[in-house]
Image (tube, rainbow, N blue to C red):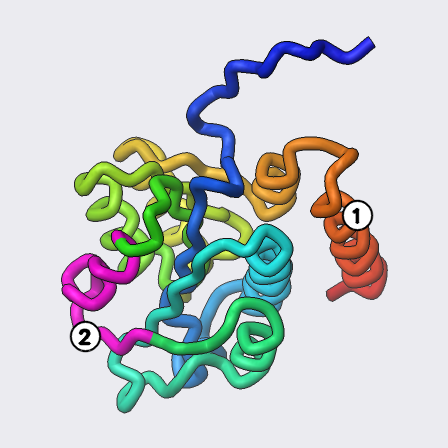
Amino acid sequence: MENELSPIRHPFLLNSANAALVVIDVQSILLPFIWEKEKMLRNIGYVLELAHIHELPTIVTEHNPKGLGPTDPDLVEELKRTVGYEPLEKNIFSCCGHEEFVDAITNTGRHQIIVVGMESHICVNQTVLDLIQNGFQVHVVEDAVRCRWENSHKLAMKKMRQAGAVICDWEMAAYELTYGAKTPEFKQLLKLMKRAKADYDAGL
């Protein structure tokens, strides 16, 4: 028999009613130089599907797009299919250095911020630390965040964790957001998991 009492959940567990997604600077000119870029793009796609399933407010940023190009075209198509594509342009490494971003993240009314994108040790790191400093709980999806060098990525993950970020992978986030197996969202999650298995089996 199921426990009818409402469980007291750990505050580090993602809650779909309190979460928003930020996709940082996945741009075409820099992307070819990114370590494990295919893995990152695949996993960002899964996270976008989660955001679609759970109707998470989503903010997309582009750093100096005149110099680094727009968001990767394939990712733009995935964004349009799932959560929409209205990028915020920036020229400060931390997204929080821009009033437009701060207003957007505040207006979501969400306290938990899920972060994906690049680069781990620059724009992602600085944004995550600034969000924490401003009272947000930040969940960094490690397998959907990358940079040019593996060592820089690992150092960034260590620093963000030390600063108070919650480090997860996309599947951990998926099951925390979905919570249980009797919800409509879980049926949609199963479709995503089948897609992910097919991608893994194909070596993608």
Q: Is residue 103 magenta?
A: yes
Q: Can residue 121 be seen from the camera position used here?
A: no
Q: Is residue 46 left or right of residue 68?
A: right
Tell me which amino acid carries mark 1: Lys
Res 171 quadrant in image: top right
Query: 103 and 60: which one is in front?
Result: 103
Q: Quadrant of the C terminus?
A: bottom right
Res 88 quadrant in image: bottom left
On the image, the x and y values in percent for residue 195 come to 79, 60
- What residue sits 22% from the left and 37% below the top? 135
On the image, the x and y values in percent for residue 10 come to 48, 20
Separation of marks 1 and 2 at Cα, in angstroms: 40 Å
Q: Residue furthest bottom?
A: 66
On the image, the x and y values in percent for residue 74 come to 58, 81
> Above or below — where is 141 with respect to 85?
above
- What residue sits 24% from the left and 64% below the top? 101
Q: Is residue 134 magenta?
A: no
Q: Can residue 118 be seen from the camera position used here?
A: yes
On the image, the x and y values in percent for residue 19 come to 44, 45
Mark sitting on residue 187: 1
- What residue sits 29% from the left and 48% below the top? 128
Dot 1 or dot 2: first in sequence order is 2
Mark sitting on residue 91: 2
> Above or below — where is 184 with respect to 150?
above
Q: Which residues are magenta?
A: 88-106
Q: Is residue 186 left or right of residue 71?
A: right
Which secondary structure lies at badge 2?
loop
Q: Quadrant of the N terminus?
A: top right
